[in-house]
Amino acid sequence: MRFLSYLTKIPRRFIFLAIALAVAIPLVIPIGIPVNVMPQSKRLFEAVDSLNSESKPILISCDFDPQSLPELYPMLMAITRQCYAKNIKVILMALWPQGTGMVEMALDELSTEFTKEYGVDYAFLGYKFGVAAVLLGMGENISGVFPVDYYGTPVDSLPLLRSVRNYKDISLIITLSTGDPGWRQWLLYAQSRYRARLGVGVTAVSAADVYPYVETKQVTGFLAGMKGASEYENLVQEKGYSTGIFRATQGMDAQSLGHLLIMIFIILGNVGYFYARRQK
């Protein structure tokens, strides 16, 4: 039992190295730790999955910046992959100027996995200043708020947007939000004023604020942080919609394995401590 006395003397460098490997390995070689899908995540997935190529398009608003990329960007990728795989038409926009960069990065990455035609299968409206005016204006006439898309093309010349006048012509709005402006403004102006169906994706720290609106069915479903993103990715994988890289799943594997290893070291340290105290 002498080895128990050494448990309090594990070199710090060994602990740091072990935790570094536990975090790094899943990011390179996915482990596939089982994910428990929460009801609100499944509701959002099912809301999108109920649509098809004949349905009205969905609108995804990227209301976040690179700081929230680890949590919200995987949501954008997973939802868009699902839409592309089911031939659901997608309209993208942003209430944050930084959100346009997130959209362009996602579209560029997805172009290597799916073959979609711009203006027919998807469109990018870009960013427009003035949150209240933008959201209320879109409830009346989207082309009045966005006469041209992000690339300067008149929206009336895009086949996808010719049949889309306002929120009534959109099946579901999904806002991926990191703060203000974000999901609260969509809830206030689009859902409450125009009765648009609303889905929400937020950072983990904001999740508690969204739950009440899910219970009142003002929010169809929502994703909470990296955990919510990994749940959605898991559902996309189960349906066979994509075989691409699922960053949130890898991130949750790394986080879970890192936490597990920390717990093991804490237990070993306590065992060694109590053994040494008993010997004294």
Image (cartoon, rainbow, N blue to C red):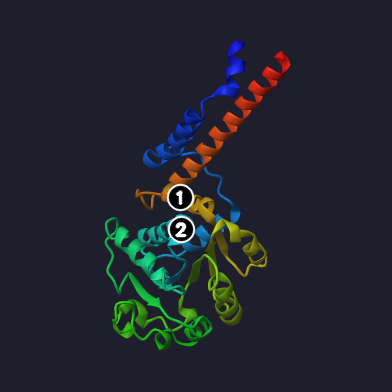
CA distance for labels 1 and 2 = 8 Å
Q: Position of residue 197 (x, y in %)?
A: 54, 72
**Residue to which mark 2 is pinned:** 75
Q: Position of residue 14 (x, y in %)?
A: 47, 28
Q: Secondary structure at mark 2?
A: helix
Question: Which residue is tagged 1?
Answer: 248
Tell me residue 111's x, y (percent). 28, 60
Q: Is residue 142 left or right of residue 40?
A: left
Mark 1 element type: helix
- Whether residues under marks 1 and 2 lie with C-beta atoms below 8 angstroms apart, the answer is yes
Q: Amino acid at mark 2?
A: Met
Query: Vertically, is 192 above or below 75?
Result: below
Q: Residue at x 40, y 49 (%)?
A: 246
Percent position (x, y) of residue 54?
Answer: 39, 70
Instruction: Examine the rendered structure and indicate whether residue 233 appears above or below residue 278.
Output: below
Q: Quadrant of the C terminus?
A: top right
Q: Nearer the viewer, residue 34 or 210?
A: 210
What residue appears at the point 50 percent right and 84 percent down from the top-left corner? Answer: 139
Residue 108 occupies which quadrant of the picture? bottom left
In the image, what residue occupies the spot 52% across and 65% down?
A: 178
Q: Label 1 is placed on what type of residue? A: Ala
Q: Quadrant of the N terminus?
A: top right
Q: Earlier in the sequence, mark 1 or mark 2?
A: 2
